[in-house]
Image (cartoon, rainbow, N blue to C red):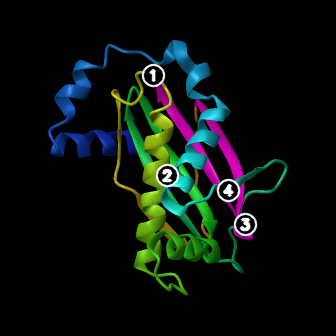
């Protein structure tokens, strides 16, 4: 899946909802001088902690030096992508094993979920959407000048996500209920 064009998708979603004029009026704001704020790793950690505590009642543990969640022929995984559009174009990506996604969805909904289904995909898409919103809310001016696309969720085995030369990329791995997940912020362009 190629992440180019997610900004256009977010802007199109805003146009449909009548928010485009508000965003264009705020476009005089520039993030170019605030790259250090946009790429601040603590903002990502704070967003993950905030969303998990609010939606699941407990936060995950950030782990350093652990490999990225495996995606391969043997292991089913789930990836959710929410695009950014406006003064920042890029995406927020949430990736975990299918088993952990099922646990998260079951805890989030209070339902007895045992396998990958549409409820799990919806729950993981919503987690990614909330992470994207929480993260952009941590940077002054970004929240009002950057829209979000509808979450896209991919599940299965043996797939890869390709990003073309991002301006910056921030990825953290977290441990939660015996599994791990990755949250990545990818920035294609800053205005």
What is the crowding at mark 4: few (fewer than 14 residues within 10 Å), some, or many (at least 20)? some
Q: Which mark is residue 140?
A: 1
Q: Which mark is residue 60?
A: 4
Where residue 112 sits: x, y (%)? Answer: 50, 86
What is the crowding at mark 2: few (fewer than 14 residues within 10 Å), some, or many (at least 20)? few
SS at mark 4?
loop
Does residue 165 appear in the picture of this structure? no
Instruction: Decide which of 115, 176 is in the foreground and name it.
Output: 176
Mark 3 to mark 1 CA distance (whole Å)? 34 Å
What is the crowding at mark 1: few (fewer than 14 residues within 10 Å), some, or many (at least 20)? few
SS at mark 2?
loop
Residue 142 is left or right of residue 49, and the answer is left
Where residue 161 sits: x, y (%)? Answer: 58, 57
Q: Report which quarter residue 21 is drawn in.
A: top left
Residue linked to disc 3: 70
Where residue 171 sits: x, y (%)? Answer: 67, 44
Q: Are marks 2 and 3 in contact (CB under 8 Å)?
A: no
Q: Which segment did they paint magenta?
A: 167-191
Q: Are marks 2 and 1 in contact (CB under 8 Å)?
A: no
The quarter of the rendered structure image containing the C terminus is top left
Does residue 74 appear in the picture of this structure? yes
Task: Nearest to the eye among marks 2 and 1: give it.
Answer: 1
What is the crowding at mark 3: few (fewer than 14 residues within 10 Å), some, or many (at least 20)? some
Q: Are marks 3 and 1 in contact (CB under 8 Å)?
A: no
Q: Are marks 4 and 2 in contact (CB under 8 Å)?
A: no
Residue linked to disc 2: 2
């Amino acid at each position: 899946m190629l992440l180019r064009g997610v900004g256009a998708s977010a802007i199109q979603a805003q146009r449909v909802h009548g928010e485009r004029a508000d965003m264009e009026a705020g476009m005089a704001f520039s993030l170019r001088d605030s790259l250090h704020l946009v790429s601040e790793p603590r903002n990502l950690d704070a967003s993950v902690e905030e969303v998990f505590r609010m939606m699941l009642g407990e936060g995950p543990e950030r782990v350093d030096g652990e490999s990225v969640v495996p995606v391969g022929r043997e292991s089913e995984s789930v990836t959710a992508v929410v695009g950014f559009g406006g003064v920042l174009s890029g995406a927020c990506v949430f990736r975990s094993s299918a088993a952990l996604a099922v646990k998260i969805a079951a805890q989030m909904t209070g339902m007895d979920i045992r396998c990958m289904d549409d409820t799990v995909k919806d729950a993981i898409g919503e987690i990614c959407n909330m992470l994207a919103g929480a993260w952009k809310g941590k940077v002054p001016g970004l929240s009002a000048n950057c829209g979000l696309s509808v979450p896209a969720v991919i599940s299965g085995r043996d797939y890869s996500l390709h990003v073309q030369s991002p301006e910056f990329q921030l990825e953290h791995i977290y441990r939660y209920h015996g599994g791990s997940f990755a949250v990545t912020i990818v920035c294609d362009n800053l205005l």
